[in-house]
Amino acid sequence: MAGAMLLVSLAARDVSHAPASVVARAKPLENPDGTKPGLVPLTSRPDRGAAVKLIRKVRVGAQGSKRGYTRTRFGVNWADSAKGVPYARNGCRTRDDLLARDGEDLRYRVGSKCVVIAMTLKDPYTGRKIRWVKGDADRVQVDHVVPLSYEWRMGASRWSKAKRVRIANDPLNLIPVYGPANEAKGGAGPASWLPPVRRIRCAYVARFAQVAVKYDLPVTRADKASMLAQCR
């Protein structure tokens, strides 16, 4: 414990401050490239109807084997090497790009425009307000909305490596969240896991559908039924 406190203390000295900020979060369908932060609940009838319309476009397919899956099949973890997605090749790791997108009151490592070492995050999945420091890194994790292992089982095993690297680093598919919630989700689709906060669930499955449609990735029949049920 003392070592962890020392690490946090040392990290806190080695910071530069970004201006204090309040993040204006976006509805999924108003954020087609994923560069706007957060995830806003869809509560109005028009918004939920638009989400249902999008979900209906998602193809249904059979789930294959996880055989052969490893994280490295989707490139080096948070590599800045993807092509054709926002933030790619900007000199910052993808994780830091996403922390900067969604975090408030950001603090950066001195001399770096990339490395976020402290921030405040409003987690859409649990509703928690998290004061995060890099010394406790796993408390905030960047969730792949459509999990990489799910993608593999639904056809990404046959994709080119370049396409897998794109989806792994596409901000549309990435949301910083409370770490234990992300760990509970694992590689599950919407039929098996949904965010604990019920009011965010339609927005979550709409974001899941956006990614699936963009990459022509099918979902299981059970997952599509669950997605539709959240927005009806």
Image (cartoon, grey):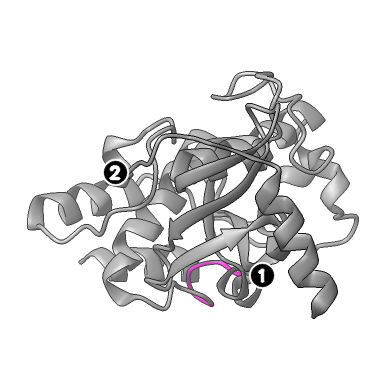
What residue appears at the point 70 percent right and 26 percent down from the top-left corner? 111
Residue 27, above or below 35 = below
Q: Is residue 192 visible?
A: yes
Query: In this picture, which residue range is highlighted in magenta?
Result: 188-192
> What residue would you read off at disc 2?
26
Magenta stretch: includes residue 189: yes
The residue type indicated by label 1 comes to: Gly
> What residue would you read off at disc 1?
186
What residue appears at the point 62 percent right and 77 percent down from the top-left corner? 184
Measured Cα–Cα span from mark 1 to mark 2: 25 Å
The residue type indicated by label 2 comes to: Ala
Image coordinates of residue 22 in percent, x first then y, are 31, 45
Q: Nearer the viewer, mark 1 or mark 2?
A: 2
Q: Name the residue nearer the viewer: 83 or 56.
A: 83
Q: Name the residue nearer the viewer: 161 or 2.
A: 2
What residue appears at the point 63 percent right and 57 percent down from the top-left corner? 147
